[in-house]
Image (cartoon, coloured by chain):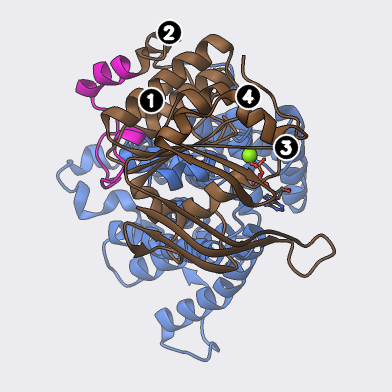
Amino acid sequence: MNFLSACDVFLSQGFVYSLIALGYYISFHILDFPDLTVEGTFLSGAVAYGLICSNGINPFLGIILAFIVGALFGALTGVLNVKLKIRPLLCGILVSTMLISINLVSTSVGLVGDFTVSGETSIPYGRDVVTLHSTKLFSFIPARLRDFGNIGLRDLVIFFAFAVICKILLDFYLKTKNGLLLRATGNNTQFVKMLSCDPGKSKIVGLAIGNGLAAISGALYTEINGNVNQSMGIGMIVIGLASLIIGISLFKKVKFMKDTTKVILGAIIYQACLTLAQKLGVPSAYNKFIMAVLFTVALLLSGKLKFKGGSKNA
Amino acid sequence: MLELKNVYTSFNKGTVDEMNLFKDFNLKINKGEFVSVIGSNGSGKTTLLNLICGTYDLDDGKILFEGKDITKVKEYKRAKHIGRVFQDPKKGTCSNLTILENFALADNKQKRYSLTKAISKKRIDYYKQIISQCNMGLEDRMNVKVGALSGGQRQALALVIAGMTDIDLLILDEHTAALDPNSSETIMLLTDKVVKEKNLTALMVTHNLRHACAYGNRLLMMSGGEIIMDKKEDEKKNTSINDILTVFNEISIEVGN
Ligand SMILES: Nc1ncnc2c1ncn2[C@@H]1O[C@H](COP(=O)(O)OP(=O)(O)O)[C@@H](O)[C@H]1O
Ligand SMILES: [Mg+2]
């Protein structure tokens, strides 16, 4: 039972965080852009979702809003880099710093209509009321079937579905003309220019997708977390990148598996390691430290110590 | 169709390494001309191509394309009417995509890169047919990543891709330099065929003097950012490799096979 509930935890977190990792697959792996915006957009997604849900609006709209908000700020990072020629790392730092205030103010305004932010900084989360699987969308399923297991298990199914749907959509996208152009942009901007396309535009699109996914991840995470608080985004860069790199490097030799599948598996393995550390009795205060150590190990294993997507050198 | 007027270009302006390459440079290329450009290393051939394509900005002067001033037009916008093969074989193709995917992308040039499927099964035979002209067996390796090909094979693919869509101007920078003698001949013949079939205006930089003499209808020689020889049509036909070598005498260049 103990083991089962542990599985439940790392699988849930794994699927939720796999969305950030999929986002990084676009921005970091394909576009070779070390994007620090996700700390901010993860929280933005959570705030947007929390506000929608706490106002009794359909949570699926919250997910869509989260994606839009994340995508907009991801695009802003792209614009800073492409149009103002600011270095990638700085762009991410600028936008995520900006987002600290934006997230705080939106939380306060959304809850108590207070611009001066003496109001709320966290959105409490009425779990039994606003979980995704209790929405109208699923009302066609008889209640008996809908209410299987416990809330945690039902959430797990939802998270799994989100990860798989996002994976399938990404796989589809990367095979379209636009997606192929994105892959070319990360590899050879000169080639893209000769196709008479603006590589800057592709880059902005890629960063928008990456951060949109991070925001959805944040939205889903509120279901695990039980509330939205302003420190939720911290550590997301490491989680996303570590999941991505573990997945891609661990399954490098596996030809039949799509990269997106590897990324999801990477996210789960990473969360499993963290859960294992906890089960071994490491106090939770050490969490972020262990996260960083595991990430370093992953980097060492993949031989990617350089801050590079690795797709550059053929 | 293409005119460079009073062009000035320099590198590292304002530093000790400042180098003024082009000073009041002028060149006019007419429609249908196939221009071979020769000149020693560092004479400014690649820079000239970069200026035409918009990779580099000019310090001063104007570039006209079909009568329109394109001096300020961005590189990717100019590319709509220009096909280009680079000196560096890595630049003309995309290494992390397959041959087929490279074709699919190039095939869509001048159209929208929309959310529809990139690879159309119907076009594959057409791609195979054009790449088979290179005689490199690439038509049987359509699903191989381009990064796994040799420099020469990549360059051949780059040429085919560059000439695939409806362009007006073809820019070639030592595009046969990385190839073995046999492939180099094949690719030159293919280049000539593409230029003639599509009625292109072409600008070809080469270190192979035999190619420079045998192909094209105009010959330019550059040195130190200036054009020191310009021969058209009959005048070019009557120019032999030895004539060029005399002009070249103190400059060491690699003479073609
Ligand atoms: N991006 C650059 N930065 C500095 N110097 C450059 C640059 N591009 C070309 N040059 C200089 O301009 C001169 C001409 O170079 P290039 O046009 O590449 O010659 P080539 O005729 O061999 O193609 C060389 O001296 C080169 O060092
Ligand atoms: Mg050169």
User: Which of the numbered marks, if any, corresponds to residue B192?
Assistant: 1
Q: CA distance from mark 4 to mark 2?
A: 36 Å
**How far is disc 2 from disc 1 in space, using C-alphas?**
21 Å
Q: Is residue B88 above or below residue A199?
A: above
**Residue labelled with disc 2:** B137
Between the residue at mark 3 and the residue at mark 1, the CA separation in whole angstroms equals 67 Å
Q: Which mark is residue A277?
A: 3
* The magenta stretch spans residue B127: yes
Of the residues shown, which amino acid type is indicated by label 4? Asn
Stretch of the chain drawn in magenta: B104-130
Mark 3 vs mark 2: give the one in front. Answer: 2
**Residue depth check, mark 3 versus mark 1: number of the one nearer the observer:** 1
Residue at the image position 22 percent from the left and 39 percent from the top: A144
Going from the N terminus, do you reach mark 4 or mark 2 first? 2
Element class at badge 2: loop
Colour blue belongs to chain: A
